[in-house]
Image (cartoon, grey):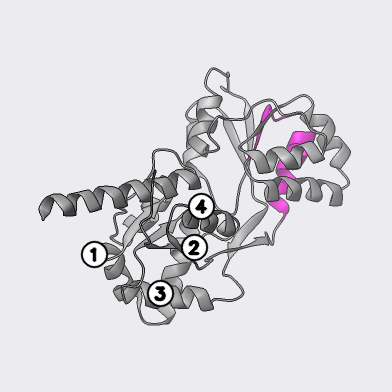
Amino acid sequence: MRSLRGKTIAITEARRASELASLIAKLGGVPYSAPAVREVPRGDPGPALEVLARICRGEIAVIVFLTGVGTRAFFGLAGEAGRREALLGALQGMIVVARGPKPIAALREAGVRIDLVPKEPTSEGLLRELTGRELGGKGVAVQLYGEENPFLVEGLRGRGATVLEIPLYEWAFPEDQGPLIRLVHDLIDGRIDVVAFTSSPQIRHLFAVAERLGLREPLALALRDGVTVAVVGPVCEAALAERGIVPRIQPEKGTMGALVHAIADHLAGAEEARGRAV
């Protein structure tokens, strides 16, 4: 049975914070929640409207929905533009891909047929699910989730697809930055055992807050040499590398559940190593 051994695990995830905290507590850890991001509608709907128009003209063969929030936002945008029915009609002739349960639920609400769902709700899982599909020269629309997804986009382009990104919302700072400010201090003061990041904007926002406090370098030092850092995915890893930080924990599967279990495995391994050293 995996255990987090009473360690304090800080999470900067916002949307699934309660789910993550529950899993941490279930595995015997102490969850410390400090949301670092907030979803806000994108100021300029132009790029998304342009992709919508191309879908309605029948120029796109595949569409990938990554989040429930983004899926509903796209249908809402189509409605505001008077093109919801045209969108629904166009989707009938396309391959519709949903990354996980939340976009699946949103598509079902809209009455949209779903053709592909990856076994793992990750970008890697999506690319594996599309293996064998002929994408050369075809248009593939990807609904983004607040930031770019270069791994998925470049993976699709590498298979010959013409990728069109649908940006619908973006990440802003949380309205209450108090928890994030406390987290900066607690990381520097050694009161956190593990900090887990699930997207690169979380890292950027944490360091931006530290910069305003005049604590950027002490924070970087704490994450390099003190606190155990865990991440999901290569984009998070790259955001840390820009700041000279190498995460000690990165699960093979890019899911939040896999991340928490990887933290537990790491803690168990560290404890066993200490036991052998005594």
Nearer-the-camera pick, 14 or 77: 14
Q: Are marks 3 and 1 in contact (CB under 8 Å)?
A: no
Q: Secondary structure at mark 2?
A: loop
| Residue ID for mark 4 | 23
Sequence-earlier tag: 2 or 3: 2
Q: Amino acid at mark 2?
A: Thr
Sequence-earlier tag: 4 or 2: 2
Query: How dense is the environment of label 2, judged by Cα within 10 Å: few (below 14), some, or many (20 and up)?
Result: many
Query: How dense is the environment of label 1, judged by Cα within 10 Å: few (below 14), some, or many (20 and up)?
Result: few
Which quarter of the image is occupied by the N terminus? top left
Q: Amino acid at mark 1?
A: Asp
User: x%, y% of residue 42?
Assistant: 67, 59
Residue 50 in sight in this render: yes
As displayed, is residue 150 above or below residue 223? above
Q: Residue furthest bottom?
A: 213
| Residue ID for mark 3 | 184
User: x%, y% of residue 69?
Assistant: 69, 51
Sequence-earlier tag: 3 or 1: 3
Nearer-the-camera pick, 149 or 112: 112
Queried whether the magenta region covers residue 63, the answer comes back as yes
Sequence-earlier tag: 4 or 3: 4
Q: Secondary structure at mark 3?
A: helix
Queried whether the magenta region covers residue 265, the answer comes back as no
Which segment is the magenta one?
45-65
Q: Amino acid at mark 3?
A: Val
